[in-house]
Image (cartoon, rainbow, N blue to C red):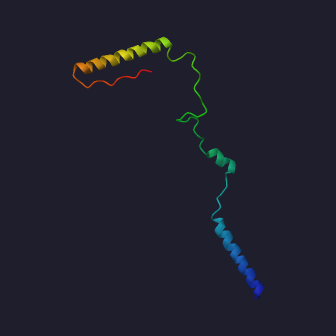
Amino acid sequence: MSKDGKVTALAAVALLLSSLSLGGCATSTAGSSLMDARAETPAPPKTSVYLPVEDLPPKREKPAMTADERSKLQKELIAARDRQASGGKAKGGAAPPQSIKP
């Protein structure tokens, strides 16, 4: 065999071995197409646990508390605080801290 024949035979053997080894890496597409693979993937969930950042709650038709309700609640809280303060003094507890009114 000549030198060129040996090189050609060696190249043919190398080509055959590389094609066989790369053939093992290929996936079989018999009976399916790339579009079928996409159709088989599960759909992403439609709803999320968290609200999207850009979604804002709708505007309220009326305020949460009217001015009358707010003043009534404030008076009730002040009265409850005063009752607690007087109860602590009667039992000999420490003096309550002075409240700072705005």
Tell me which corner region of the image, top left, top right, bottom left or bottom right, holds residue 80. Answer: top left
Report the side of 4 relative to 30 (left or right).
right
Q: Which residue appears farthest toward the top when viewing the image? A: 68
Q: Quadrant of the C terminus?
A: top left
Residue at point 57% right, 26% down? 57
The reply, left or right, for residue 75 in relation to residue 2 is left
Relative to 102, say whether 11 is above or below: below
Going 59% across and 43% down the picture, which residue do you hit?
42
Q: Is residue 63 above or below residue 14?
A: above
Total numbered circles: 0
Across and down, in percent, residue 58 comes to: 59, 23
Splitting the image into 4 quarters, where does residue 86 fall? top left
* Nearer to me, 54 or 41: 54
Residue at position x 71%, y 80% from top? 10
- Who's the residue at 69% across and 73% down the image? 16
- State left or right for residue 74 relative to residue 44: left
Q: Which quarter of the image is occupied by the N terminus?
A: bottom right
Where residue 84 sits: x, y (%)? 30, 19
Residue 82 picture location, percent across and down: 33, 17
The answer to which quarter of the image holds residue 59 is top right
| Image x and y of residue 76, in percent | 38, 14
Residue 64, compared with residue 5, is above or below; it is above
Nearer-the-camera pick, 72 or 42: 72
